[in-house]
Amino acid sequence: MSGDFLTAAGAGGWNVVQYAFLQHAIAKECGLEAGILLHVVQDLHLYNKHTEQAAELIKRYAEDTGELNTKVQIKISDKPFFELTADDVELIGYEPKGKIDKLDVAI
């Protein structure tokens, strides 16, 4: 799997967030507890135009936690899977760090 470090596959990128939510939602629907999500990317890359934003992201996490990995829990309401909306999901332990300059997606 290939992934863009900032916009998709790394450091809490969109792909990781989607997969974590899906894992928790399906586990809840099946009456199971979600396990640990391990997201492996073979070709994680950072585009030249994103180097300043990447440095800022790493700096923020290192300053706050002393490490890059933080644990966020996902709490999902008891609605059936296909009735879930964004309002039915709570992220516990997530602390937004503020906006980082615009990230253009490379095409």
Image: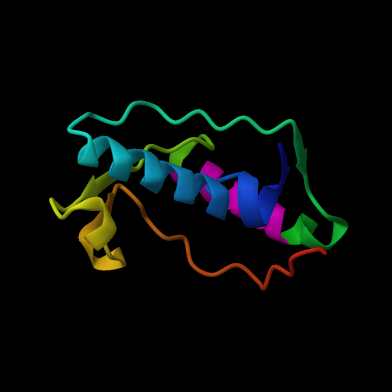
Whether residue 19 is situated above or below residue 35 in the rendered picture:
below
Q: Position of residue 57 (x, y in %)?
A: 61, 53
Quadrant of the rendered image containing residue 82:
bottom left
Q: Is residue 45 left or right of residue 88?
A: right
Q: Quadrant of the N terminus?
A: top right
Residue at image point 42% right, 42% down: 20
Quadrant of the rendered image containing residue 50:
bottom right
**Residue 58 is inside the magenta segment:** yes
Q: Quadrant of the C terminus?
A: bottom right
Q: Residue furthest right?
A: 48
Q: Is residue 57 left or right of residue 63?
A: right
Give 101 or 7, whichever is nearer the viewer: 7
| Residue 13 can be seen, yes or no | no
Q: Position of residue 59 (x, y in %)?
A: 61, 49
Q: Position of residue 62 (x, y in %)?
A: 54, 42
**Residue 37 is inside the magenta segment:** no
| Residue 86 can be seen, yes or no | yes
Q: Position of residue 69 (x, y in %)?
A: 49, 35
Residue at image point 44% right, 31% down: 37
Q: Main secondary structure of the magenta part?
A: helix
Residue at image point 54% right, 37% down: 68
Count every numbered label the image shows and give the total.
Answer: 0
Q: Residue furthest left?
A: 78
Q: How is the image coloured?
A: rainbow
Please give the range of residues in magenta: 53-64
Whether residue 51 is situated above or below residue 69 in the rendered picture:
below
Q: Is residue 32 left or right of residue 62?
A: left
Residue at image point 60% right, 67% down: 100
